[in-house]
Image (cartoon, grey):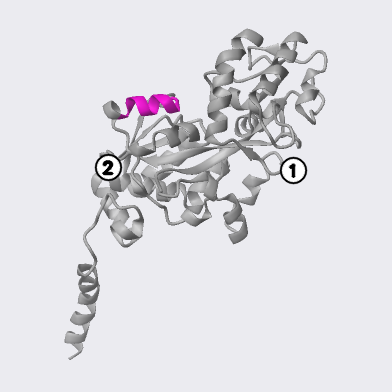
């Protein structure tokens, strides 16, 4: 009788597993496609590979994120064109066949038909305006436009207008017609009463140029207008650099995650998303000075790494996040006017 009981007990899990539905690696959620996290991990391990694109290892701690994911699950991560921009990701997708994308919101919205809908387990923690209601795309991390400066040469700037003071050397991280961070720097400088208008931003940088304050060399400038995660990382090196987010001009932007509808490794792609949106993954973004999209939820639940969060520059106002139509109109204006007025 005892032997029969032991055998029955050992057989229970197998019977339970046999009742689970077949795995559907194309499903729109972990529960629908895999039933349990363990089965998702098992399916991803069988695929053995994940292809990511446009993820430089020194960008928001992606090097550690990729290594941690690979070590945790025994999955080889192939890094395709790390320096590619969002447009290039889409352009190269048919040839390179990435499993997942990391994109600017305007590109993600425009190309949503290329993505496989998937809602991570922490879907409800993502603000509604930062995700597609169908699950095609969803923000993972972002930042606020900031003023990085050399305190030996520049008094702490309280606003963008402070950059017009004589003797400053102010730079953007590239051409705003081509580089997203530079574009958003122009838009942050344009903010007035919570509204961003490209013409105000272009006029401001025209004034900087007329004052002799505009530099085309970020490494040599005493002020760099860039995302706070870039300026904060530079400040952390201890080489005499500080960062401030003007209280009257807080512009935020987030980077979007999406799964390729034609992903060669669909289970690994879904496991990657679950990892990025887990508490651990979100805190790894925070370690790279980016602001995880679930930051408010992590703080409420006590799972936010407060030591890392304390290293971010303080923000005293709710950020403005541009809509896609606003981005499109502003980009069109810069294409027409930047060269004529500033360059």
**Main secondary structure of the magenta stretch:** helix
Q: Nearer the viewer, mark 2 or mark 1?
A: 1
Q: Nearer the viewer, residue 159 or 201?
A: 201
**Quarter of the image with the N terminus in it:** bottom left
| Whole-percent x, y for residue 184 in the image | 61, 27
Q: Which mark is residue 262?
A: none
Residue at 28 percent of width and 32 percent of height: 97
> Is 278 within the magenta?
no
Residue range of the region highlighted in magenta in the rendering: 85-93
Is 96 in front, or is 249?
Answer: 249
The residue lying toward the viewer, choosing from 303 and 115, is: 115
Instruction: Inspect the magenta stretch and tell me whether residue 92 lies in it.
Output: yes
Please rate how many residues cluster around mark 2, counting C-alpha atoms within 10 Å: few if below 14, some from 14 to 19, many from 20.
Answer: many
Q: What is the crowding at mark 1: few (fewer than 14 residues within 10 Å), some, or many (at least 20)?
A: few
Residue 222 visible to an observer of this rendering: no
Quick one: which residue is furthest to the bottom in this view? Answer: 1
Answer with the quarter of the image where residue 156 lies: top right
Question: Which residue is tagged 2?
Answer: 265
């Amino acid at each position: 009788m005892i032997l029969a009981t032991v055998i029955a007990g050992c057989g229970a899990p197998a019977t339970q597993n046999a009742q689970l539905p077949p795995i559907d690696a194309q499903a729109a959620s972990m529960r629908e496609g895999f039933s349990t996290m363990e089965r998702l991990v098992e399916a991803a391990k069988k695929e053995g590979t994940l292809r990511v694109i446009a993820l430089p290892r020194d960008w928001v701690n992606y090097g550690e994120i990729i290594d941690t994911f690979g070590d945790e699950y025994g999955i080889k991560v192939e890094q395709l064109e790390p320096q590619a921009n969002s447009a290039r990701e889409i352009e190269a997708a048919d040839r390179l066949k990435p499993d997942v994308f990391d994109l600017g919101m305007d590109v993600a919205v425009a190309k949503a038909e290329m993505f496989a809908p998937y809602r991570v387990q922490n879907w409800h923690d993502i603000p509604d305006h930062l995700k597609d209601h169908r699950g095609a795309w969803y923000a993972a991390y972002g930042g606020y436009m900031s003023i990085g400066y050399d305190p030996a040469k520049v008094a702490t700037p309280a606003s963008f207008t402070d950059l017009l003071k004589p003797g400053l050397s102010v730079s953007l991280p590239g051409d705003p017609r081509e580089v997203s961070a530079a574009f958003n720097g122009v838009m942050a400088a344009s903010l007035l009463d919570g509204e961003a208008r490209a013409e105000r931003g272009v006029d401001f940088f025209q004034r900087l140029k007329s004052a002799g304050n505009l530099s085309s060399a970020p490494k040599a400038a005493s002020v760099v207008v860039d995302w706070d995660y870039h300026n904060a990382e530079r400040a952390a090196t201890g080489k005499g650099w500080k960062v401030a987010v003007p209280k009257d001009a807080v512009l935020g932007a987030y980077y979007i995650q999406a799964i390729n509808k034609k992903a060669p490794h669909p289970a690994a792609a879904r496991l990657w998303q679950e990892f990025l949106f887990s508490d651990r993954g979100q805190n790894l973004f925070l370690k790279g000075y980016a602001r995880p999209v679930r930051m408010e939820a992590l703080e409420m639940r006590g799972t936010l790494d407060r030591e890392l969060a304390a290293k971010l520059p303080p923000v005293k106002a709710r950020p403005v996040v541009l809509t896609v139509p606003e981005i499109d109109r502003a980009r069109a204006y810069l294409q027409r006017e930047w060269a004529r007025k500033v360059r």
